[in-house]
Image (tube, rainbow, N blue to C red):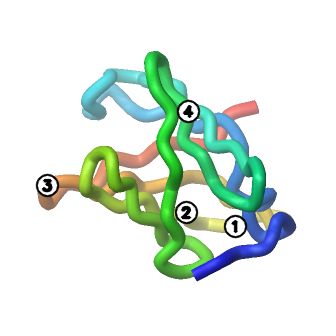
Amino acid sequence: MKLDGKALATLAGHYKFGGDFFVPNGLYEVESAKGELWLRYPGSDTVLTPQSPTDFFVRAFWSNVVFADFKDGVATHLIWKFGGSDYVAQRVP
């Protein structure tokens, strides 16, 4: 599935996880670049592969990221689904 740059731009931004995440209170960047969505975090970058306009596969971790609760056309948070658990990251400025 391919998404256009406008759709990807609604997901791009900085997201902060809670204390229950693998990197407690980790700050991650989601960037739209070259027609793809990238997850950037300390020490590495990985492509997010679209499964739907809001659901992406993270091949590096064999998990899924779902963008949710759109306000003014922009995702307010993401949910990282891994190993039967959901980890929520809020969009931050």
Q: Residues within 10 Å of mark 1 (few under 14, many from 20)?
A: few
Work out whether mark 1 precedes mark 3 in sequence or the reverse, and give the earlier one.
1
Work out whether mark 3 precedes mark 2 in sequence or the reverse, and give the earlier one.
2
Distance from the alpha carbon under mark 2 to that under mark 1: 8 Å
Quarter that holds the N terminus: bottom right
Q: Is residue 31 above or below residue 40?
A: below
Q: Name which residue type carries label 4.
A: Arg
Residue at far top of view: 43
Q: Which residue is mark 4?
A: 40
Quarter that holds the C terminus: top right
Q: Of circles 2 and 1, which is in front?
A: 2
Q: Which residue is mark 1?
A: 70
Q: Which residue is mark 2?
A: 67
Work out whether mark 2 precedes mark 4 in sequence or the reverse, and give the earlier one.
4
- Is mark 3 in CB contact (under 8 Å) with mark 2? no
Q: Name which residue type carries label 2.
A: Phe
- Is mark 4 in CB contact (under 8 Å) with mark 3? no
Residue at the location (61% across, 66% down)?
A: 69
Q: Is residue 50 left or right of residue 74?
A: left
Residue at the location (28% across, 57% down)?
A: 63
Image coords of residue 91 (percent x, y): 64, 42
- Is mark 2 in CB contact (under 8 Å) with mark 1? yes
Distance from the alpha carbon under mark 1 to that under mark 3: 25 Å
Q: Nearer the viewer, residue 86 or 47?
A: 47
Q: Nearer the viewer, residue 6 or 22?
A: 6
Numbered mark located on residue 83 in the image: 3
Q: Of circles 4 and 3, which is in front?
A: 4
Image coords of residue 62 (percent x, y): 25, 55
Q: Quadrant of residue 28?
A: top right
Residue at the location (48% across, 18% down)?
A: 42
Q: Name which residue type carries label 3.
A: Gly
